[in-house]
Image (cartoon, rainbow, N blue to C red):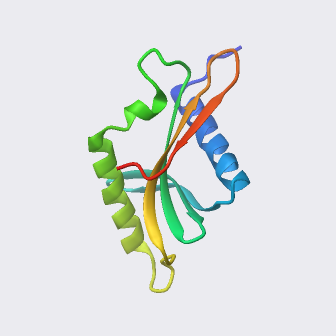
Amino acid sequence: MDTPTARDLGGYGERLACRYLVEVGYTIVTRNWRCARGELDVVAVVPGVLVFCEVKTRSSERFGAPFEAVTWRKLGRLRTLAGIWLDSLADGERPPGDQRLDVISILKPPTGRVRLEHLMGVS
């Protein structure tokens, strides 16, 4: 059996995060939006709020919980990307309401249960 790559693990985490978000009432607007400055993992809407969601997936906590990889520097980059994404929308496409940055942290160990944590309004 092949060992999953970091890309495989990340893809798994993003699929799981989207499934979770839909199950709890979010609508996925886009996934893996890219520009020259970086990537937004998931953009979703829950009534009244546009959510930019960073997904971090790890197979162990050897180097800390997945959400700990989202540093203040990474948050700054995500805010910049959110602004670029909003600016890229045509007139009238911008969802109304507030905006928020969330982190979904997924721990998928080689054996045992997968753990998902949703941190809302990360600043």
Q: Quadrant of the N terminus?
A: top right
Instruction: State left or right for residue 106 relative to residue 39.
Output: right
Residue drawn at (33%, 47%) of the image: 75
Q: Residue 78 in the image: x percent, y percent?
A: 36, 52
Q: Residue 65 in the image: x percent, y percent?
A: 46, 26
Of residue 50 and residue 78, the one placed in the foreground of this image is: 50
Asked where in the image residue 98 lies, by quadrant, the reply is: bottom left
Residue drawn at (63%, 29%) of the image: 115
Q: Residue 34 in the image: x percent, y percent?
A: 44, 55
Residue drawn at (56%, 25%) of the image: 5
Instruction: State left or right for residue 106 relative to residue 88.
Output: right
Asked where in the image residue 67 lies, by quadrant, the reply is: top left
Q: Residue 36 in the image: x percent, y percent?
A: 33, 55
Instruction: State left or right for residue 88 relative to residue 41.
Output: left
Q: Is residue 118 above or below residue 5?
A: below
Q: Is residue 40 above or below residue 66?
A: below
